[in-house]
Amino acid sequence: MDEQQLLSRLRRGDEQALAAVIARFSAYVVTVIHNRSRGLLSPEDEDELASSTFFALWQSCRTVKAGSIRAWLGSVARNKTVDRLRKARMDMPLDEELAGTDDFLLEETVKKEQARQLREAVALLQEPDREIIRRFYDLCQTAPEIAAALDLTPAAVRMRLVRSREAIRNELCRGGFAYE
């Protein structure tokens, strides 16, 4: 059954269609959540976010465009993950010993600086390399999916990924980011 049929059945309130969507896309949704959280969430939290994502699809299926269930799920999963991480960071009481240490502050500062350097290194890439990196890491798309979207061959996408990673690594090293 294709996405159009699934979406049509979802809009009619067919619970079996929702079960089919969950069976088809649950691994993808959990992968998006895990990658976006960078392993900071527990498996239980990841499962809860995945369930919440599918529930959001059930509630909002009328707003989803035909043929874009996967993209919609990925977008919602990423947004819910970011929201959860922000909330966890705001709700997390600082350990008094930890908050007062220079090591804690230094670590936070280094993380922010590394993130800034990474964003800048990616921004230096030319198109379509920047788009390939975004699709691969942010949208969790495979090389064949990226190739189809950008009218390239999967081999060209993989080669551009290798070259882009190397360019990013070199730029980060020039900026003082050291790999161990």
Image (spheres, rainbow, N blue to C red):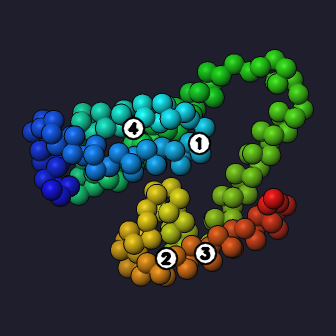
Q: Which mark is residue 50?
A: 4
Q: Are marks 2 and 4 in contact (CB under 8 Å)?
A: no
Label 1 sits on a secondary structure element that is loop
| Residue 85 appears anywhere in the view | yes
Q: Looking at the image, is mark 4 or mark 3 earlier in the sequence?
A: 4
Name above or below for residue 95 compared with residue 56.
Answer: above
Instruction: Identify the residue under disc 3.
Output: 162
Instruction: Identify the residue under disc 2.
Output: 157
| Image x and y of residue 162, in percent | 61, 75
The residue located at (46%, 49%) in the rendering is 31
**Crowdedness near tag 3: few (<14), some (14–19) or many (≥20) residues, C-alpha within 10 Å:** few
Instruction: Identify the residue under disc 1.
Output: 39
Q: Are marks 1 and 4 in contact (CB under 8 Å)?
A: no
**Crowdedness near tag 1: few (<14), some (14–19) or many (≥20) residues, C-alpha within 10 Å:** few
Q: Looking at the image, is mark 1 or mark 2 earlier in the sequence?
A: 1
Q: If the image is split into quadrants, where does the N terminus sit?
A: bottom left
Q: Is residue 150 left or right of residue 70?
A: right
Q: Looking at the image, is mark 1 or mark 4 earlier in the sequence?
A: 1
Which numbered disc, 1 or 2, marks the residue closer to the eye? Answer: 1
Q: Are marks 1 and 3 in contact (CB under 8 Å)?
A: no
Type of amino acid at the residue the image marks with label 4: Ala
| Residue 10 appears anywhere in the view | no
Type of amino acid at the residue the image marks with label 1: Gly
Q: Which mark is residue 114?
A: none
The residue located at (77%, 50%) in the rendering is 113
Q: Is residue 153 left or right of residue 59?
A: right
The residue located at (45%, 71%) in the rendering is 143
Q: Looking at the image, is mark 2 or mark 3 earlier in the sequence?
A: 2
Q: Are marks 2 and 3 in contact (CB under 8 Å)?
A: no
Rounded to the nearest angstrom, the CA distance separating label 1 from label 2 is 26 Å
Label 4 sits on a secondary structure element that is helix
